[in-house]
Amino acid sequence: MKDIKTIYCDFDGTITKKDMVNTFFEMYADEKWIESEKLWVEGKISSRENAIIQVGMLKEMEEKTLNDFINNFEIDEHFADFVNFVQSKSIKVVILSDGFDLFIQKVLERLNLKNVEFYSNHLIYKNNKFSIEFPHYNENCKKGAGMCKCSKVKEDDFCYIGDGTSDLCVAKKAKILFATKNLMKYCKEKNINFIQFNSFSDIVEYMQLSL
């Protein structure tokens, strides 16, 4: 860890206890959103195409409903402690997400972590309706992601923390990888070295011993 200057971290299912985007669609989108999700999982459409389809299925929503959803969503209780600890060691934390900036920004504000850099897709909420833009789209992304995580990593030696499908490409390049859930299963199948974690308290404990 002593050579690591930046830790890149996934958001949905990693910082949040469940996938925030999928939960949002489960609660507020036309039930056909799951058909698009299946096509994406099967590799028949890109994650960018999937996001466009699914956001188009969201129902009109009052602002209070949106804010209540975000403010009540469960976050790893130890994430803020993790950020404060690594920043005290002059290590930068950057969130890379193929999810929605609106969710990430409000969660960071809730945790009083407004100085954490993040990159994601741009969810637009206007007149009770939703649309999406992709300011970090990379046409060379092999996964067709809305937000290409690999394109945002500038160092050879970096640490990555993640849990799922959108993390697969960038996880292979990490010098130190913390993995859980589906990313952990993938690493086991492909013999990729990783450190298992259940919460950010596990990561802090590891780093306290290695920094």
Image (cartoon, rainbow, N blue to C red):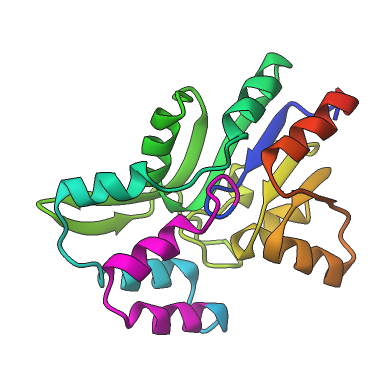
135 left or right of 117? left
Main SS, magenta residues: helix
- Of residues 163 and 146, the one nearer the viewer is 163
Residue 108 is drawn in which quadrant?
A: top left
Side (left or right) of 171 relative to 81 = right
Which residue is painted at 56% across and 40% down in the image? 95
Q: Quadrant of the N terminus?
A: top right
**Which range of residues does the magenta coloring cover?**
14-40
Q: Is residue 17 left or right of residue 146?
A: right
Q: Is residue 94 above or below residue 42?
A: above
Image coordinates for residue 98, horizontal then vertical, percent = 49, 55
Residue that appears at 35% across and 41% down: 71
Q: Position of residue 136 (x, y in %)?
A: 45, 49
Q: Is residue 187 in view from this perspective?
A: yes
Q: Is residue 2 visible?
A: no
- Check the image and name the residue furthest to the left: 127
Task: Assess whether residue 146 is covered by the magenta stretch.
Answer: no
In this rendering, the count of numbered labels is: 0
Residue 202 image position (x, y, % from top left): 77, 39
The quadrant the C terminus occupies is: top right
Q: Nearer the viewer, residue 46 or 104?
A: 104
Residue appearing at x 77%, y 68% in the figure: 185
Query: What percent of the width, then of the height, locates residue 140?
Result: 56, 61
